[in-house]
Amino acid sequence: MPELPEVETIVRKLNAGLPVEKNYPAYPPLPGHTILAVQANWPRQIYPSVRALKKQLPGHRIEAITRRGKYLVFKLAFAPQLSLSQFLERGPGGEGYLLIHLKMSGRLDVVPASWPRSKHDHLVVGLDNNYELRFNDARKFGRVYLVNDVQQVVGQLGPEPLEAAFTLGAFRALVAGRSGALKPTLLDQTFIAGVGNIYADESLWRARLHPRRKLGALAPDEVAALYRSIRAALNDGIKHGGSTIDWVYPEGNYQKRLKVYGRAGQPCRRCRATIQRIVVGQRSTFICPHCQIEA
């Protein structure tokens, strides 16, 4: 599943456009372009409905693309005088947002409208420049939301770990009173938004913390180390375009720099001990048994 660095990389490419890269065609920035048509065959994955997307999105402009946790957030330009309920009933109305969560196998492609479509292109958004934004999802776990308030979807998410407001003091306050194991807590999106399996393992390795350690038992210097490590791992992932682990997300280069994730049987990049795979909270977890001691 794409995590914060992968989603952030996608957001930046959609905002900036893309020159010819690998086997992908060049495409212009999406903001400023108008949606002309929508095709969708995803009734269980789209909120409020496929009918709403097909009827209401055409004719409206993509103003900006941002990210909240693992969600892509498309800000859409609608006439301001109508609420979402009126918008859904009568047409354009209110400031709108299209949110997309890629889940396990989702991928967004921007390609010329003339390109053949895949059987897994379950949502196709036609633009005014003869390009299409296609949501390809072989497993159909992805989600699409049309709302007038982003908080309707992301209101329960924890803080963004790379924002300026996420200081060490803020992290200490977040940790206070928590007693769960480190790895499951980092994966809890209501604790911190955007961290998944890959970057949880990478953060814990950087901080020299075992994933089964209890959050409430960490010393102050360990809390500080974890805070710095989370931010460092995520920033490093973004710098290198995220991690390519399988066919779902082919653009990244950070997999070449991973310290523990997916490296069972290989030497630790810090101490040369053999990386081990264990299971924590029913999730595959990779550790260095020498650097990350379970106290």
Image: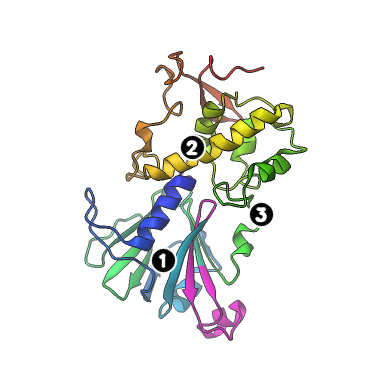
**Local crowd size for mark 2, using a 10 Å CA cut-off: few (<14), some (14–19), many (≥20):** many
Q: Secondary structure at mark 2?
A: helix
Per the rendering, the mark at residue 233 is 2
Q: Quadrant location of residue 186?
A: top right
Whether residue 2 can be seen here? no
Residue placed most toward the observer, 135 or 218: 218
Q: Circle 3 sits on which residue? A: 156
Helix or strand or loop: what does disc 3 sit on? Answer: loop
Residue 28: image x %, image y %? 29, 65
In whole angstroms, how far apart are the C-alphas of marks 1 and 3?
A: 28 Å
Give how far across and how far down residue 41 sits, in percent. Answer: 42, 63
| Magenta residue span | 68-97
Could one spot residue 247 in this view of the protein?
Answer: yes
| Rendered image coloring scheme | rainbow
The dot on residue 203 is: none
Q: Is tag 1's residue or tag 3's residue first in the polypeptide sequence?
A: 1
Q: Which residue is mark 1?
A: 40
Residues packed near mark 3 inside 10 Å, few (<14), some (14 to 19) or many (20 plus): few
Q: How many marks?
A: 3
111 magenta-colored: no
